[in-house]
Image (cartoon, rainbow, N blue to C red):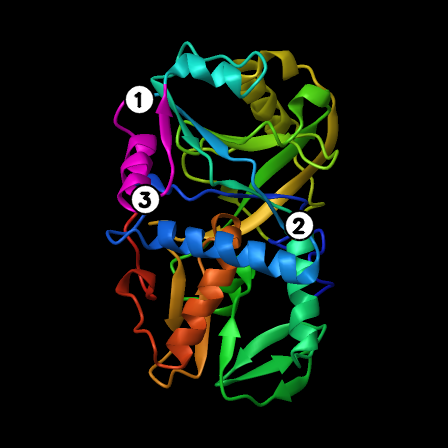
Amino acid sequence: MERNSPAHARASSHDSSRLLRLGHGDEDLPDNWYTRSALRSRRLWTEIGEEEGVDLFVPSGALWLARTVAGYEERSRRDLGALGIPVERLAAADAVAFFPGVRHDDLAFVLHEPMAGVLRATACVHTLIRRALRGGATLRTGTARPDGGGVLVDSERLGCDRVIWACGPWLPRLFPGILDLRSVKQAVFYFGAGARWRTPPVPAWIDDGGYGYGLGDLDGSGFKAVYAPPRRGLDLDPDAGDGLPDAGDLHLARALLAHRFPSLAAAPVVTATLCRYELTPDLHFVVAPTDETGRAWIVGGGSGHGFKHSPALGEYVADLLEDRERPRPAFGLGRRRQR
């Protein structure tokens, strides 16, 4: 089911790229669920691409730029090391080996995650649609809303055994009162940069535990920079506005570049868009049935954060529906504690 065409410009899954990092720092659960899920998804994205003859995952690596000794990045280092995933803690000055002219005098260290990379997001969506259609799925275009244990698509009721509602930032209005969820936005800018900024070899980057992130020029799209504020996005009506960042968004993105990558501070904007997604206060997913019948399930809570997890999350949901897994309390409905 899709309201518009798959990966359309206002969808939470659109845009040319998404980071796939394995480290999750203090976002992770005690059993490193997110890190293990990201590792599984990395393998599945690679296998799907090989089977379909398209490079969905680009193994560029990622560099975390840590401003404190014992913060988000150090927790990620410990978690990755405990799972046997390659990771290198390097001196701050070693950042210059990865980025031209990067500022590093305010960094405590840098963390190199060589198994991280970048997903070609639009290609991923279209590839999954093709595979689903070959497997017997039917793609319907229309506006869906819950109707008891079924679905209303426009004015037609569809009967079904199970329904999975994975509707990104539209979830709060579909299920008011049972979800502790915000619809939010982040502005995404691509800046014109020279050949030395290509990804790869330039890795993805995460500055100060997620306050800013991006990657080099992948497939000629430009240098990607996203200013991610501490509360992870500004409130958004997913159907409102023109879908473009404003002057204030651009000012923040340029300030990020001027601080970390000074030679790009005045680079021209080649593309700009908004990333629409949804977040719970504790930043954990929602994967839970809507009631005791278990006929309808909600899957969401982090479509921007969660894109990389899609294949492994799909396996997890399938196992829940087939009773091979038990629901995790951390992913339940109801109120969440603010992180």
Q: Give the answer, above or below, for where 140 lies relative to 282.
A: below
Q: Which residue is mark 2?
A: 55
Query: Is residue 317 at least partly visible in the picture?
Result: yes
Tell me what residue is drawn at x 57 percent, y 54 percent: 46
Type of the residue with mark 3: Gly
Q: CA distance from mark 3 to mark 2?
A: 26 Å
Q: Residues within 10 Å of mark 3 (few under 14, many from 20)?
A: few
Indicate which label's residue lies in the foreground, 1 or 2: 2
Q: Which residue is mark 3?
A: 84
Hey, what amino acid is under mark 2? Asp
Specify the farthest residue to the top.
Answer: 105
Q: Is residue 157 magenta?
A: no
Indicate the amino acid at tag 1: Thr
- Label 1 and label 2: CA atoms lie apart by 36 Å
Q: Is 72 covered by the magenta stretch?
A: yes
Graded by Cα atoms within 10 Å as few (under 14), some (14 to 19) or many (20 or more), the crowding at tag 2 reads: some
**What are the residue bounds of the magenta stretch?**
68-90
Which residue is drawn at the image coordinates 32% and 33% (left, top)?
A: 72
Relative to 224, 63 lies left or right = left
Give the residue drawn at x 58%, y 90%: 159
The residue lying toward the viewer, choosing from 153 and 302, is 302
Q: Name the foreground residue: 185 vs 54.
A: 54
Q: Of the numbered discs in the image, which one, if any, rests on residue 68?
A: 1
Q: Which callout, 1 or 2, points at the residue further toward the start of the chain? A: 2
Q: Position of residue 166 (x, y in %)?
A: 52, 66
> Is label 2 in a helix, a strand or a loop?
loop
Residue 127 is situated, as x and y percent measured from the top left of the image, at 68, 61
Residue at horizontal 39 percent and vertical 12 percent from the top:
106
